[in-house]
Amino acid sequence: MKTIKVSMRFSPDIVTKPLTYHLIKDYDLEVNILNANVGLNKIGQLVADITGEEAKIEEGLKFLKEQGVDIRLFTRSIIWQEEGCVHCGACTAVCPTEALTMDKNSWSLTFNKEKCVVCELCVRTCPIKVMSVSI
Ligand code: SF4
Ligand code: SF4
């Protein structure tokens, strides 16, 4: 089994097609949607973790491409230098997926990497540059 993180961009003419349903049913894949921006007659975007047999993942991605979905695999990740963080919370205000949140008891930052879509907004926002992107 393997898990990949992928961004899928849908043009307005295919945005209402049940493509994730086919990934699950026809390719036996688990699709965990991390972020969705989908509307009728608009370009749609999904960020998801896809888990399954490697060959099935390949087939599923091929199917999506054939349907006209623009696919981007996440090869980079966010690195948080926790020891330098001053827990100001500025990054939580820009994080679109709530990967970055403040613990309400300790008022310290928590980072849930599973939810991160590597949008890099926190990298640009952090005043002391303790967020960076892996190369
Ligand atoms: S903006 Fe930077 S210093 Fe402030 S909580 Fe986020 S990572 Fe820490
Ligand atoms: S890159 Fe930063 S702001 Fe973007 S989703 Fe990941 S943690 Fe949140």
Image (spheres, helix red, strand yellow):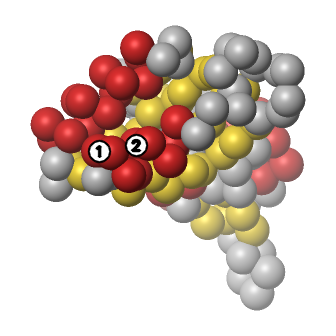
From the viewer's perspective, tell me whether residue 126 is left or right of residue 19: right
Q: Which residue is mark 1?
A: 27
Task: Assign a secondary structure to mark 1.
Answer: helix
Q: Residue at x 79, y 80 (%)?
A: 104
Amino acid identity at mark 1: Tyr
Q: Position of residue 56 (x, y in %)?
A: 21, 40
Q: CA distance from mark 1 to mark 2?
A: 5 Å
**Above-or-below relation of 51 to 71:** below
Quadrant of residue 111 within the rendered picture = bottom right
Q: Position of residue 106 (x, y in %)?
A: 72, 82
The one of 81 and 54 positioned closer to us in this rendering: 54
10 Å neighbourhood of mark 1: few (<14), some, or many (≥20)?
A: some
Q: Is residue 68 visible?
A: yes
Q: Are marks 1 and 2 in contact (CB under 8 Å)?
A: yes
Q: Is residue 82 visible?
A: no
**Above-or-below relation of 48 to 88:** above
**Above-or-below relation of 123 to 30:** above
The one of 84 and 111 positioned closer to us in this rendering: 111
From the viewer's perspective, tell me whether residue 49 is left or right of residue 51: right
Amino acid identity at mark 2: Leu
Q: Which residue is mark 2?
A: 23
Q: Residue at x 63, y 55 (%)?
A: 99
Q: Check residue 13 in the rendering and tell me which mark sits there, or answer none.
A: none
